[in-house]
C-alpha cells in the first residue's frame, strides 16, 4: 500500500497507521485526523463537524488527560480525534448499536490504537457499564439532538439514534459523565444552540458545573446551530462558579471561504486548513 503524505500542498501530520483492514461493501474509509482514518457506512451515520469540534473542545479545555471516555460513541469519531490529539491517553468507549461498534473496532485496528482502546457495547444509562473502571479525566459525548416526533428520522436505521432521542437524552449523558468523572475532570459535549437551556439544566441536575460554552455559526451572519459545552464536578469548584461564554466560532465567512480561526482549528486536529492550493506534484511514501 502507498501512503499519501500530502493533500495538495499540505502535508498530513502525525504517525502512519498500520492499516491492513479491508473496506467491505457498503463502507467507506475516510481521513479523520492526520493519517488516521475511520470506517463509515456509505448511507449510514457518518462523522460530522459536530463530532470533531467536540473532540477539539474537550482536549482543548481538559487540564490533563491520562484516561478518557466517550459516551454514545457511535462509530468512534470523537474518540479517534481525541486519541490523535492525546497520544499518551487511554480510552474507553460505550455504544449500544452493534453495527456502529463493529465499524469502530475496524477503525481502531486500522489506526493501530488497540492497545489504547477499550470498546464496550452497552447502554450508557446502565450504571454498571463502567462501574468496574477507574474514573476518567475527560468524558466526551454528542447526545442526540431531537425528541421523538420533533424531527425527520434518518433514512438508515443505524443513523436514527445519533439524531433522535430513542436511547436517552442529554440528561442521561450528563448523569453518566458525573458517575465516571475523576476529580478535576472535564465533561465536554455538543448540543443544539436552541436547546442550550436544556443542556445547562442537565449539567446542574447531574451535580456538575458549567465552565465554558462556545456557540458555533456555520455561516457568517446566521444564527448559531450548535453549542459546545465544558463542565466539571460542582464539588471540585467554589460555590457560584461562573460559566465563560466564549465568542462564537464561525465555520465559513459570508463569501463561503473557511474562517481563519476555524482553519487553524482544523489543523489542530490533523485536517487540511481549508483553502489548500493544488501546488506541484508531491512525493508519496511507500509503506
Image (cartoon, grey):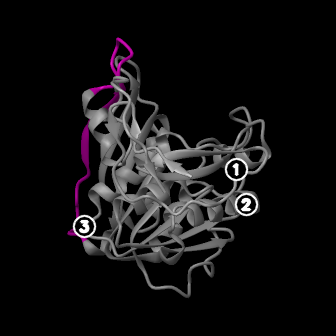
Q: Are marks 1 and 2 in contact (CB under 8 Å)?
A: yes
As measured in the structure, the alpha-carbon distance from the residue carrying label 1 to the one carrying label 2 is 9 Å
Q: CA distance from mark 1 to mark 3?
A: 31 Å
Can you identify the residue that label 3 sits on? Answer: 63
Q: Is residue 76 left or right of residue 230?
A: right
Per the rendering, the mark at residue 109 is none
Circle 2: element type: loop
* Residue 133 image offset from top left, x and y in percent: 51, 85
Specify the quadrant of the image occupied by residue 22: bottom right
User: Which is nearer the eye, 271 or 55?
Assistant: 271
Q: Determine if residue 71 is in view.
A: yes
x and y percentages locating residue 165 in the rendered image: 67, 49
User: In front here: 246 or 30?
Assistant: 30
In magenta segment, residue 219: no
Q: Earlier in the sequence, mark 1 or mark 3?
A: 3
Q: Nearer the viewer, mark 1 or mark 2?
A: 2
Q: Which residue is mark 2?
A: 97
Residue receiving disc 1: 161
Characterize the local packing of mark 2: few (<14), some (14-19) or many (20 or more) Cα atoms within 10 angstroms: some
Question: What secondary structure characterizes most of the magenta part?
Answer: loop
For the point 65% across and 60% down, the residue is: 21
**187 up-or-down from 160: above or below:** below
Image: magenta residue range: 237-259
Task: Give the mark nearest the N terminus, 3 or 2.
Answer: 3
Q: CA distance from mark 3 to mark 2?
A: 31 Å
Amino acid at each position: 500500500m502507498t501512503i499519501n503524505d500530502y493533500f495538495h500542498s499540505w502535508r498530513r501530520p502525525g504517525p502512519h497507521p498500520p492499516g491492513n483492514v479491508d473496506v467491505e461493501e457498503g463502507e467507506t474509509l475516510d481521513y479523520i485526523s492526520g493519517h488516521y482514518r475511520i470506517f463509515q457506512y456509505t448511507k449510514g451515520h457518518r462523522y460530522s463537524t459536530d463530532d470533531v469540534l467536540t473532540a477539539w473542545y474537550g482536549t482543548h479545555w481538559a487540564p490533563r488527560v491520562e484516561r478518557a471516555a466517550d459516551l454514545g460513541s457511535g462509530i468512534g469519531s470523537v474518540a479517534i480525534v481525541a486519541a490523535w490529539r492525546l497520544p499518551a491517553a487511554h480510552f474507553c468507549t460505550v455504544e449500544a448499536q452493534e453495527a456502529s461498534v463493529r465499524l469502530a473496532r475496524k477503525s481502531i485496528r486500522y489506526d493501530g490504537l488497540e492497545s489504547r482502546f477499550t470498546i464496550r457495547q452497552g447502554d450508557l444509562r446502565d450504571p454498571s457499564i463502567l462501574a468496574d473502571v477507574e474514573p476518567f479525566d475527560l468524558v466526551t459525548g454528542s447526545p442526540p439532538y431531537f425528541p421523538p416526533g420533533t424531527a425527520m428520522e434518518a433514512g438508515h436505521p443505524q443513523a436514527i439514534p445519533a439524531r433522535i432521542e430513542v436511547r436517552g437524552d442529554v440528561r442521561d449523558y450528563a448523569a453518566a459523565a458525573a458517575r465516571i468523572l475523576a476529580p478535576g475532570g472535564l465533561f465536554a459535549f455538543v448540543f443544539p444552540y436552541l436547546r442550550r437551556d436544556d443542556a445547562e439544566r442537565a449539567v446542574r441536575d447531574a451535580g456538575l458545573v458549567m465552565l465554558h460554552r462556545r456557540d458555533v455559526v456555520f455561516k457568517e451572519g446566521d444564527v448559531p446551530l450548535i453549542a459546545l459545552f465544558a463542565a466539571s464536578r460542582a464539588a471540585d469548584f467554589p460555590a457560584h462558579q461562573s460559566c465563560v461564554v466564549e465568542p462564537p466560532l464561525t465555520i465559513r465567512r459570508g463569501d463561503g471561504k473557511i474562517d481563519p480561526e476555524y482553519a487553524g482549528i482544523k489543523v489542530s486536529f490533523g485536517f487540511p486548513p481549508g483553502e489548500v492550493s493544488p501546488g506541484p506534484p508531491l512525493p508519496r511514501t511507500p509503506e
